[in-house]
Image (cartoon, rainbow, N blue to C red):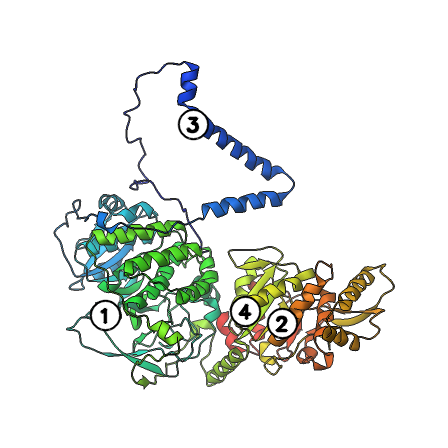
Amino acid sequence: MLVQQDSSVPKSKPQNPKSSLFPRTLRNRFSPSKSLDFSTWFSENLYKIITIAFLIASVAAVFFLRNISDSATFFCFQQEVKQIETIIHFPKINYDSILPITDKTTPYSKFRSDQWIIVSVSDYPSDSLKKLLKIKGWQVLAVGNSKTPNDWSLKGTIFLSLDDQAKLGFRVVDYLPYDSYVRKTVGYLFAIQHGAKKIFDFDDRGELIDDNINKHFDIELGQNAKKQIILQYNHDNPNRTVVNPYIHFGQRSVWPRGLPLENVGQIEHEEHYNKVLSGSQFIQQGISNGLPDIDSVFYFTRKQNQEPFDIKFDEHAPKVAFPQGTMVPVNSFNTIFHYSAFWGLMLPVSVSSMASDVLRGYWAQRLLWEIGGYVVVYPPTVHRSDKFESYPFAEEKDLHVNVGDLIKFLISWRSNKTGLFEKILELSYAMGKERFWSEKDVKFTVAWIQDLVSVGYLQPRLMGLELDKLKRGGVVNYGDRKDFVPQKLPSVYLGVEETSTVNYEIGNLVRWRKNFGNVVLIMFCNGDVERTALEWRLLYGRVFKSVIILANKKNRELVVEEGHLDHLYKQLPRLFDRFESAEGFLFVQDDTILNYWNLVQADKNKLWITDKVSRSWSTVPYDGNKDFHGKQAEMVKEVVSSMPAHLQVSYKDHTVNHDSTLTICGSEVFYIPRRLVVDFIDLVNLVGDRDIHQKVAIPMMFIAMDSPRNFDSVFKKMVYRKKPPKDISISFYSPEAPAVHPMVVSNEEDFIKLIRVMAAGDPMLLDLV
């Protein structure tokens, strides 16, 4: 679930937080006195007594459960309460009961304009905001919040203070936080109420290039508009669900806020594009030069010596569209919404502010397909200077973890509803059930649709969903194809030298991705996952299908699952079932570094393990069940005796003196191909509740599944030493080895050092530091 703020719904209209709150009525204050007869009093107040008694008992129960030694009891209790609290009811709207809302409280009740620029203001008018007033034909609307100065004013601008917003009568006001830009939602409704046909969603810290909106965007889409041909990403890769648009505009090493981190390494450009006719680009996203819309991971890992970013994009690159089934991050800084997409302006309120517009963008794109619309990204339209604080990572942490799952969910979502508003309600409800946002946003969606109807907005009609036609193997005719090769602009702020070797490096990354793109990496972290989980995903997610992280303690926010290394093999079947189409599964501990470029030659149909590394794989004698090895050996004998014939024969044929020796393996890294997953699961089931340690269980299972002669010897030349180095350096690490053990990466600084030494094998890793 994304980071949630207060999920409770405010009562009635919000009041100015600076003013005091008083009771609305005192009519019962001087009601006639009643008899003090106990029986009368008791009978009249019985329900109150029962209620108070229940509350006291509940509080007592909570304190009791918190203080008893069995913490699991209280955990179960909390889980049950949480399940009750998160029950979400399907929303319903009685459209016949919705009354019109007209502007009766501002001086602009009779004002009408087709084109609006809407900004959120927290400080006095900026120079860039003042320049917007020079743009002809566009009305600027500034929406205030609790941070806005009380005397805010700018001639030519319509300003809505908190008090003004509360008087407009919109239902959404009850759900909006006081101190956030998401209060722009009120501005959207105000503009629609006053005749808006186009809305430019803008950030007052950016400067519009050439002070001309019409020059950069497609403002006219109607019958009188000139029909143009737009390049569109193709459908050749059915597994591609999201695209980094910055690559198309010359910056392959930069990624936008909202792009899943596992997609950062996908930097190959489109080989050829489809051609589509313009007219349905109802959402138009502009790009910012200088400081583009980047996330905190990029900001804090790419910046050098506090020098401000001044990133340039190719202004001559053609605008590009995205077909159904392929999404792109959309923000609230530099975006045009046409009338047909006004319903998609809703900014969620139960998620963090830095997740709100990204979540809105993906949600709106999915619904846009239902009316035949699409998103188009345009060359640089705005310049933003890097002179303000970057967004805090804490505000984005859950966005990085959950946005990939959100995209997959949205693309798979289907609805049989016959109207767009009903589809919007159904999707909002489904996202609430999947915990991408809370019930507060489900209710907020109801209020938003009701307000849209109240201000006279007409919902667009539905169109056939082309995505289903593609899934069925049909062909959607987009016309001719066209080639376009993006520029590779200098990335001096990214630690990347653009040389003739770049194409070779990109080719390598593509080759590695193709080789491991259907292999799942399972990592166990012994260290602090809060300081390394995202970094591991960033490193290995560039290459592998998915990166699953386990640790001793579960971390929901970082999607770290609980596991115990001593018996982690027992959890693997559950993970195997999760990825039924994966080619294989590669397990690694976080103190073992994978040089994936040296694993390409390994056979993905064979088992990989460290059986040729003497310090990792060894055979030890035992005498009875007196010590650890003896006790483990006795349990191994029990499992072997119950193995099916093919597994038992393989184990006994390939173990020397299996009645008196025990095979031990550190199990730091190993690979299981899809063809042997069933055998592995069977062996785990045979172990059952026996307390066989992972270092014993893994070699037992590997020898039972296949002859060691058939194991791939890819790890034969790995670096394996007893103790980790004091510092991560090239003197210990070897880029020629398939893996290196042990290396301790416990924080961001260690990760940066690791990336720099690994760049000897994958130079493009320098893009990450």
The answer to whether residue 422 shows anywhere in this view is: yes
The residue carrying pointer 2 sits among few (fewer than 14), some (14 to 19) or many (20 or more) residues within 10 Å by Cα, namely some
Marks 2 and 1, the one that precedes in the sequence: 1
Label 4, secondary structure: give it: loop
Q: Quadrant of residue 620?
A: bottom right
Query: To which residue does mark 3 refer?
Result: 47
Q: Is residue 384 above or below residue 52?
A: below
In primary-sequence order, the first of circles 1 and 3 is 3
Mark 1 against mark 3, which lies toward the viewer?
3
**Nearer the viewer's eye, disc 2 or disc 1?**
2
Judge left or right: residue 757 versus residue 185: right
Q: Position of residue 571 (x, y in %)?
A: 63, 62
Gap in Å between the C-alphas at discs 4 and 1? 50 Å
* Mark 2 to mark 4 CA distance (whole Å): 11 Å
The span from disc 1 to disc 3 (Cα, nearest Å) is 69 Å
Q: Amino acid at mark 3?
A: Tyr
Q: Position of residue 45 (x, y in %)?
A: 41, 23
Q: Which residue is mark 2?
A: 677
Residue drawn at (66%, 77%), measured in percent from left and top? Answer: 607
Query: Looking at the picture, how far across and down is residue 638, in whole percent?
Result: 78, 64
Q: Nearer the viewer, residue 108 or 59?
A: 59
| Residue extending furthest toward the left | 110
Residue at (30, 17) in percent of width and height: 32
Marked residue nearer the N-terminal end (3 or 4): 3
The residue indicated by pointer 4 is 579
